Amino acid sequence: EAEVAQSPRYKITEKSQAVAFWCDPISGHATLYWYRQILGQGPELLVQFQDESVVDDSQLPKDRFSAERLKGVDSTLKIQPAELGDSAMYLCASSFGGYTEAFFGQGTRLTVV
Amino acid sequence: QQQVKQSPQSLIVQKGGISIINCAYENTAFDYFPWYQQFPGKGPALLIAIRPDVSEKKEGRFTISFNKSAKQFSLHIMDSQPGDSATYFCAAYNFNKFYFGSGTKLNVKP
């Protein structure tokens, strides 16, 4: 069964260090989302791609976060420098777009110490 | 501003009982309402979804009730089982973007 792959599953990093997360969406899915989920809360959209183009990054803290999807397939989310408040689950999701199911990966649990 | 408000935050139900989770929204432009189920350490997975042109959708033990005029929708889990213990998120969709509720942690007691 096709699934969204994310790595690493867990990441512990020190404050002020750089950290990167990788996502490989389901083949053929043009829409890719990065969400942040703080423990006990719902996912919040950080950035949305349509193919290789960013269509929404209004909630992305651009002073420290960056995201790319260079060839319109896999994607990388980077944080530099990491802050204590960045500790959360980072979820990647993909879909065909429109009224179709968004499939989520298992996420990367980030702990900033 | 939270686009979708979900309640309760947590819910304890006895095995065989009915679990009910409620969501409300303000933006009438939302036109697709999915429910996601999330187990600890996993990403959310689609459970059931509804479009606003119907008032109810049922899939097995899971039912969505939708009240367009009240801008509310709810998830009913009939004959709740311990394996249903998870966190449930409602969501609303518009212009290729999902807005999630804050989640309900369901615990079904054996």
Image (tube, coloured by chain):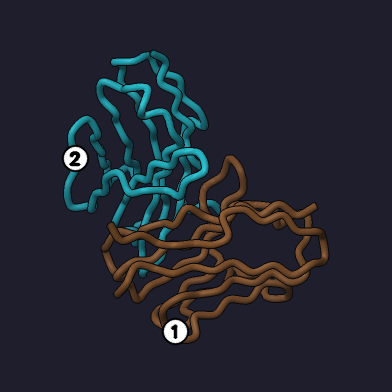
Badge 1: few (under 14), some or many (20 or more) residues near its Cα, within 10 Å? some
Chain A's colour? brown
Q: Label 2: few (<14), some or many (≥20) within 10 Å?
A: some
Q: Position of residue A33 (x, y in %)?
A: 46, 67
Q: CA distance from mark 2 to mark 1?
A: 37 Å
Residue under the point 19% across and 42% down? B55
The circle on residue A14 is none
For image coordinates 61% across by 70% down, the residue present is A60
Question: In the rendered view, would you say A4 is above or below A31?
Answer: above
- Quadrant containing the N terminus of chain B is bottom right
Q: Colour of chain B?
A: cyan
Residue placed under numbered mark 2 in the picture? B56
- Specify whether A95 is left or right of A57: left
Q: Which image quadrant for residue B37? A: top left
Image quadrant occupied by the C terminus of chain B: top left
Q: What kind of residue is marked 1?
A: Glu
Residues at discs 2 and 1 both on one chain: no
Q: Is residue B5 above or below residue A101?
A: above
Q: Using the image, tell me which numbered label, if any, was put on residue A52.
A: 1
